[in-house]
Every structure is written in structure tokens, then in C-alpha cells.
């Protein structure tokens, strides 16, 4: 049976390979080591370039495209951007990706929309990582009642149905980019904290922590000078995988008309327009182009995150499977 | 077992109480407008608004209203208040829409288990094979796909393009009760099921693969193999049983979250479920209905959590509930 042999052979490979790697490149930091491994992962490097390209498109490209086409993202070009029947026009030499239902330039709007998505994705993720890491370290390091309390709070947070609660929040505070970011943040720090807590639980039993204690270091110092650097790997990996999740949540809220408010463009909102005004067959460019940018973004971050996980944790299955 | 159950139910009630309290005070203190004015309508005179306020008991102290709301929840049938828009009891509206959301969630769940778990088993029993690699890539693409994007794509191809081509196989919207016409019921729901199933199947195939691969490396599996059991028996009887534990956990939580309303899917496929109700009531500022939908959604999540914990003990004999 070939499958049983495979499963067997796969098992004992991991630790010798790791030891060897540490032996030959001794003295380099884990981040450096991970970077060396990542460079050999073709999919991850391609994703890195795609992500760089998307940032360039959204941040440098948006104003440049605006200047070249002469189209403001929010101006409605009723004369040239709509047909005589008031329908959006398809891609042409003036509107490279066509226009939307109000005669606005789709390309410029997609570029600015990608900017909103990336900005919210990165900023919310950064905040979630900081909050989640601090809370996770505290729970894992102190243990006992502190841990029980924090873990219960995390349980409650993870128990909330996201969209319904987000909708309730939006109903109370009125939709805006800020509320969107805050609502998402409210939910996504919890899994970070849970992961960090788990790591810290095992880290605090290690010898170097004991060494810290015997040298007279206080808790804060041990938590943030001794424990924290050991969390860099998992936090970077989880952060990279969190960005596309945040972007999906943001675009979903915008799609429902409960996220970033018009006239500011977002990818989800352009797609929401297609749905609300049944433009599927009338203006398919409004469907496919924003979708493409959105999928490219989430896929690139997920692939990079996958690659990073392998790079930081060489014993993990995908590396083995090569 | 009984003690465990009691404790879990008490914790579940605590969670629901926290949510009810948070929702109540957020709406009545931080809410966007005066509930009495919302109820009375925009054109109402000051006297009418005052009368409505008295009639609804909104002129009483907040803690009294809170107490009434809370005790109302513990009546049988529970009193969730009255809609501002159509003056119907919120509970009736929710019960009326519940079958739609349950149909969507259960149908999708059956499909994603049927798709996700076999793919995961296939990949885990043949690690490194072409099938395994393809499954990994497809799963990653699925994970990067926001539900609303997949829903829009399916809606576009199976409704718009097919209808345009002269094959109106799928309806644009609407719901037909199962007992009225099972065929029409499935026909109206199939695209919604597919949307959710494909998105979730990605996670489940990955999880099944990872979990099964881990279990197949354990000692007792080697024992099972060495006593000459058929590979099929080893994988399905011995391996799958303990590999299923994390899948059951995730399944319970996912199903619980979906039962409370599948907001995006209901919107795209025009299905009048709880999710659609939540969105609609946000736009009409119908506070009691929003609060009701949040509580019902949270209720499903809490119940799902309890059921998941109990299933643990059934699947994994090592788990003892205390």
C-alpha cells in the first residue's frame, strides 16, 4: 500500500532537517533564517511582488491615473460616461475600464477603492496584533485567574456572530470608515490573543525565563523583553493571514451598504452597486474588474502567509511535502 | 455530565445576558434617535410622540425598562418587543423567517461536509500526490474567496447568463416552503447552498487533511496496521474517528453562526431569512427587530457551543466532562 508507506516516511523527517539547518547557519536570528527560506519559495515571492504591485497601484497609481485620465474618482461624467439611455459605458479610450452607473471612471474608483481596502486591512491588523499580543502575553504569563478571565472574554468575543453584531453597531453609530474599522478590530484581536496565549503558556516554562527571574527581572521586563521576541514568528504569520480576512470583512460590510460611505469608493461598494441595481449583464466590467482586484489581494496575502508559516516553522507539513 | 451541562448552560445564559444588556443600553443611550419618534413616524406631532412614549413606557426610568425587557425574555413565549415599523411582535416576525435561514444553513452544511471531508481524506491518505497538491491550491483559492464574490459569480452565471441564453433554470429570488413543494424549495435554495458550501468546503478539506494526517502518524494507528487491518478500516474506523473532533467543533460553531442568518447569501439570492431581516431593519432603524435578530443569532451560537462540547465526549473517549 503506497499510502501507508507515505504516511510512515513523512513522520521522522522533520527534526533532523531542522537541526541541520540550525547547525550550518548558526548565529542568525530566526527572522533572518525565515527570510532565507522564504526566498526559495517561489509562490511566496510572487505573492510578495503582487502585493507590492497592489500597494503601488492603490497609493501611487491612484493619483497618477487620476492625472493621466483627468478623471476625479467622484465626478459623474454624465455627458461622456453614460450612454443616451443613462447606462454605464464599457471600457474605451477615455474610460479604460468603463464607467459605473453614475458615469464615474471605474479605473480611478477601483484604484482609490483598493487604497481604502488595503489601508483598513493593514491598519486594523496592526492594531489587532498589538492588542491581541499584549492581552495574550498577560493571560499566558500570569496564568491562573487572570488567564481564566481573559480566556472567557475571548470565548465570548469569538461567540458573537460577526456580521449581525457589526450590523447592529452600524445601526447605532451610523456607517463610516471609522466604525467599519473599529467593529472589525473589536472581533479580530481575540483570535490573536488566543494564539499568543498558547505560545506564552509553553514559553514561560522554558529555562531562559527562569534565568530572567533569577537575575531579578520584573514581570513586565520578562514579558516584553524576554517573551515577546519569541512571538515574532507566529505573530508575523498570523498577521499576514489576518490582513485578507479584514479586507474581506470590510468589503462585505461595504457590499451591504454598511461600510465606508459613498461617494468614497471601495471595492465592496462597487460590487454592491452591481447587485443593488442589477447591473450584472448591463455593465459586466463593474462586476469583473473590482472582483479581480479583490481576489488578487486576498489570494496574494494568503499565499504569502502560507509561505511565511513554512518559513518560520520548517517542520510544518508543506515543507515536508516537497 | 449533568454538572457539566448545568455549568455550560449557566455560562451560556451569562453570555446571552451580557449581549442583551450591551445591546439594550447601546441602543437606548448611544442610539441614533429617540425610539418614540422612530415608532411614531416622521410626520408625527410632538403630542403624538409624547403619547407614543407613554404608551411604550419609554418615559419611565431606564432601569425599569431594562428590567421589563429582561424579564420579557424569560416569559414563555419570550417577549422581544414590538416592531417600530409594522407594530408586529418581533418574535412573530423572527419565527416567520426562521425556516428560510434554517433551510439555507442545513442544506449548505450537508453539501460542504459532502464536498470538504472526502477531499480532505483523499489528500491526507495520499500526501504529496497530484490530488493532494490540487486540493491544497483549490482550498487556498476558496479561502481567499469572499462569500459575496462567489455568490455574485454563481448568480451571474446560473441566473443571468442561463436566463439570457434561454434556460431559466434558477429563479432570481423568493422562497418556497419545503412542505409546500420540495422541488421548488430546493430549486430556490440551490445556488445559495452552493455559495456557502463551496466557501466552507475549503476550510473543511484543509482541516480534515491536517487533522487526519496528524492522527495517522500516531502509535495506535501503527498498531492497527501491524495487526493486519485493512487500510480502509485503519483510515475510516481508527483514524477518522479521532480526526473528526476538531471538525465537529468547527462544524458546530459554523452551523450555529449560519442559523442566525446568512446575511450576504440571503441578500444576493433574494431569500427572506433572518439575515435579510437584520439588514432591512438597520436601514429602517427598527431597533426592536435589530435587537431581536442579534439575540436570536447569539442564542444559536451559544447553543452550538454547548452541543459541540458534549459531542466531544462522544467522539473522543479521552475527554471526560467535569
Image (cartoon, coloured by chain):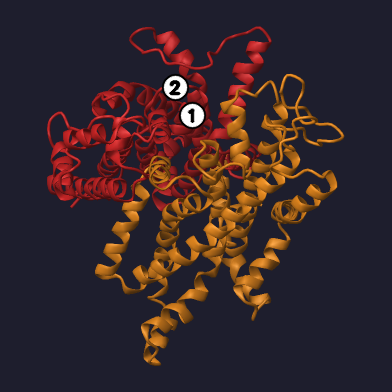
Residue that mark 2 sits on:
B271
Colour of chain A as rendered = orange
Circle 2 residues within 10 Å: few <14, some 14–19, many ≥20: many
Colour of chain B as rendered = red
Instruction: Give residue B261's position: percent from left, percent from top.
Output: 38, 32
Q: What chain letter is assigned to the residue under label 2?
A: B
Determine the CA span between mark 1 and mark 2.
Answer: 8 Å
Q: For the point 68% across and 61% down, which residue is it?
A: A38
Would you identify the image quadrant in which residue B92 lies?
A: top left
Verify CB contact (< 8 Å) between mark 1 and mark 2: yes
Element marked by disc 2: loop
Q: What chain letter is assigned to the residue under label 1?
A: B
Element marked by disc 1: helix
Residue that mark 1 sits on:
B265
The residue furthest right is A93
Tell me if residue B88 comes above or below residue A108 in the rendering.
above
Q: For the point 59% across and 17% down, which residue is it?
A: B159
Amino acid at each position: 500500500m503506497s499510502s501507508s508507506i507515505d504516511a510512515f516516511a513523512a513522520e521522522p523527517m522533520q527534526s533532523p532537517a531542522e537541526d541541520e539547518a540550525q547547525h550550518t547557519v548558526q548565529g542568525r536570528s530566526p527572522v533572518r533564517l525565515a527570510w532565507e527560506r522564504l526566498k526559495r519559495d517561489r509562490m511566496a515571492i510572487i505573492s510578495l511582488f503582487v502585493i507590492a504591485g497592489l500597494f503601488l497601484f492603490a497609493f501611487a497609481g491612484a493619483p497618477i491615473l487620476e492625472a493621466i485620465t483627468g478623471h476625479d474618482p467622484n465626478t459623474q461624467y454624465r455627458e461622456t460616461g453614460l450612454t443616451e439611455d443613462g447606462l454605464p459605458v464599457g471600457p474605451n479610450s477615455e474610460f479604460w475600464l468603463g464607467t459605473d452607473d453614475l458615469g464615474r471612471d471605474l479605473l480611478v474608483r477601483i484604484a482609490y477603492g483598493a487604497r481604502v481596502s488595503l489601508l483598513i486591512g493593514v491598519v486594523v491588523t496592526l492594531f489587532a496584533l498589538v492588542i491581541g499580543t499584549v492581552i495574550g502575553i498577560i493571560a499566558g504569563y500570569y496564568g491562573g485567574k487572570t488567564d481564566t478571565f481573559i480566556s472567557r472574554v475571548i470565548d465570548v468575543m469569538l461567540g458573537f456572530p460577526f456580521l449581525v453584531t457589526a450590523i447592529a453597531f452600524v445601526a447605532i453609530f451610523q456607517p463610516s470608515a471609522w466604525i467599519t474599522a473599529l467593529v472589525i478590530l473589536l472581533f479580530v484581536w481575540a483570535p490573536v490573543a488566543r494564539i499568543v496565549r498558547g505560545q506564552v503558556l509553553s514559553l514561560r516554562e522554558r529555562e531562559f525565563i527562569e534565568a530572567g527571574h533569577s537575575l531579578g527581572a520584573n514581570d513586565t521586563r520578562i514579558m516584553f523583553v524576554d517573551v515577546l521576541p519569541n512571538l515574532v514568528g507566529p505573530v508575523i504569520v498570523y498577521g499576514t493571514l489576518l490582513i485578507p480576512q479584514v479586507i474581506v470583512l470590510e468589503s462585505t460590510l461595504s457590499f451591504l451598504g454598511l461600510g465606508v460611505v459613498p461617494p468614497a469608493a471601495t471595492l465592496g461598494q462597487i460590487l454592491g452597486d452591481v447587485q443593488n441595481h442589477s447591473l450584472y449583464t448591463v455593465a459586466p466590467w463593474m462586476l469583473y474588474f473590482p472582483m479581480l482586484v479583490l481576489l488578487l489581494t486576498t489570494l496574494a496575502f494568503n499565499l504569502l502567509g502560507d509561505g511565511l508559516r513554512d518559513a518560520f516553522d520548517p517542520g510544518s507539513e508543506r515543507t515536508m511535502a516537497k | 455530565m449533568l454538572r457539566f451541562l448545568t455549568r455550560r448552560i449557566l455560562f451560556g445564559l451569562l453570555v446571552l445576558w451580557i449581549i442583551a444588556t450591551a445591546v439594550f443600553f447601546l441602543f437606548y443611550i448611544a442610539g441614533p434617535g429617540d425610539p418614540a419618534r422612530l415608532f411614531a413616524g416622521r410626520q408625527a406631532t410632538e403630542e403624538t410622540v409624547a403619547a407614543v412614549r407613554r404608551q411604550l413606557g419609554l418615559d419611565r426610568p431606564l432601569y425599569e425598562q431594562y428590567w421589563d425587557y429582561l424579564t420579557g425574555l424569560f416569559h414563555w413565549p419570550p417577549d422581544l418587543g414590538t416592531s417600530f415599523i409594522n407594530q408586529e411582535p418581533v418574535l412573530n416576525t423572527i419565527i416567520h423567517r426562521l425556516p428560510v435561514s434554517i433551510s439555507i444553513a442545513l442544506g449548505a452544511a450537508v453539501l460542504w461536509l459532502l464536498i470538504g471531508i472526502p477531499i480532505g481524506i483523499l489528500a491526507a491518505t495520499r500526501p504529496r500526490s497530484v490530488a493532494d497538491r490540487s486540493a491544497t491550491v483549490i482550498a487556498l483559492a476558496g479561502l481567499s474567496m469572499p462569500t459575496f464574490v462567489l455568490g455574485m459569480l454563481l448568480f451571474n452565471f446560473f441566473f443571468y447568463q442561463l436566463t439570457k441564453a434561454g434556460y431559466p433554470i434558477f429563479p432570481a429570488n423568493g422562497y418556497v416552503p419545503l412542505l409546500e413543494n420540495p422541488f421548488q424549495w430546493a430549486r430556490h435554495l440551490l445556488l445559495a447552498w452552493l455559495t456557502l458550501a463551496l466557501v466552507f468546503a475549503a476550510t473543511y478539506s484543509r482541516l480534515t487533511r491536517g487533522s487526519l494526517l496528524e492522527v495517522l502518524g500516531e502509535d495506535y494507528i501503527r498498531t492497527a496496521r501491524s495487526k493486519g487491518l485493512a487500510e480502509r478500516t485503519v483510515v475510516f474506523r481508527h483514524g477518522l474517528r479521532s480526526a473528526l473532533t476538531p471538525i465537529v467543533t468547527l462544524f458546530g460553531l459554523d452551523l450555529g453562526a449560519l442559523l442566525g442568518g446568512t446575511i450576504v447569501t440571503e441578500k444576493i439570492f433574494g431569500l427572506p431569512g433572518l439575515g435579510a431581516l437584520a439588514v432591512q431593519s438597520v436601514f429602517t432603524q427598527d431597533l426592536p427587530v435589530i435587537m431581536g435578530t442579534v439575540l436570536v443569532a447569539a442564542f444559536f451560537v451559544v447553543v452550538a457551543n454547548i452541543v459541540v462540547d458534549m459531542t466531544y465526549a462522544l467522539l473522543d473517549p479521552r475527554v471526560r466532562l467535569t
